[in-house]
Amino acid sequence: MTKKSPRQWVYSPKSAPKPKIPEAIKQTVTDRCNALVENVLKPKAVQPPPEDADFNYIVDLSTKWHGSYFYFCATYRCPGDNCISEFFEIRFARLEYAGGDRFHMAYMRYTDQWQEIFRDLTLDECLDSIENDPMFMP
């Protein structure tokens, strides 16, 4: 029989506050990412609905800010008769503002956890990764 260790207090310092995003950077990111979605990602991912639609399919791609995170989202349609909701949204890529003109990039794993794979990239490097890396496709 094993004996439990007694509970004890442990020092846990507060994490550093996230940097405030300047409005100019926020607007630049929004404009450039929306252009990428409209010109590159939508033509690849959004297709006409299949003839015999039994499975979910993408109907739209969008972006949104939430705090210091910028998300790329895919809206799916669920065509089945027994679906809970006809449409649902999945976030598939995330940029986190890291200060200056740098961002951290993460993708949504099948476990519904964000996996950060790139740190301190410029916006151009982030957009190139989203366009060319299959890890960031919806």
Image (cartoon, rainbow, N blue to C red):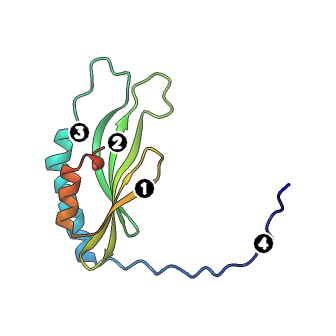
Q: Which mark is residue 75?
A: 2
Q: Are marks 3 and 2 in contact (CB under 8 Å)?
A: no
Quadrant occupied by the N terminus: bottom right
**Mark closer to the chain start, 1 or 2:** 2
Q: Which mark is residue 7?
A: 4
Q: Which residue is mark 3?
A: 45
**Mark closer to the chain start, 1 or 3:** 3
Q: Amino acid at mark 4?
A: Arg
Residue reaching furthest right? 1
Residue 117: horizontal and vertical position, in percent?
A: 34, 59
Q: Amino acid at mark 1?
A: Trp
**Distance (Cα) linking label 1 and label 3:** 21 Å
Q: Nearer the viewer, mark 1 or mark 3?
A: 1
Q: Secondary structure at mark 3?
A: helix
Q: Residues within 10 Å of mark 1 (few under 14, many from 20)?
A: some
Q: Which residue is mark 1?
A: 114
**Mark closer to the chain start, 3 or 2:** 3
Q: Which mark is residue 46?
A: none
Q: Residues within 10 Å of mark 4 (few under 14, many from 20)?
A: few
**Distance (Cα) linking label 1 and label 4:** 31 Å
Q: Secondary structure at mark 2?
A: strand
Q: Residues within 10 Å of mark 2 (few under 14, many from 20)?
A: some
Q: Nearer the viewer, mark 3 or mark 4?
A: 4
What residue sits 51% from the left and 32% below the top? 84
Q: Are marks 3 and 4 in contact (CB under 8 Å)?
A: no
**Mark closer to the chain start, 3 or 4:** 4
Q: Nearer the viewer, mark 1 or mark 4?
A: 4
Q: Are marks 1 and 4 in contact (CB under 8 Å)?
A: no
What residue sits 26% from the left and 80% below the top? 100
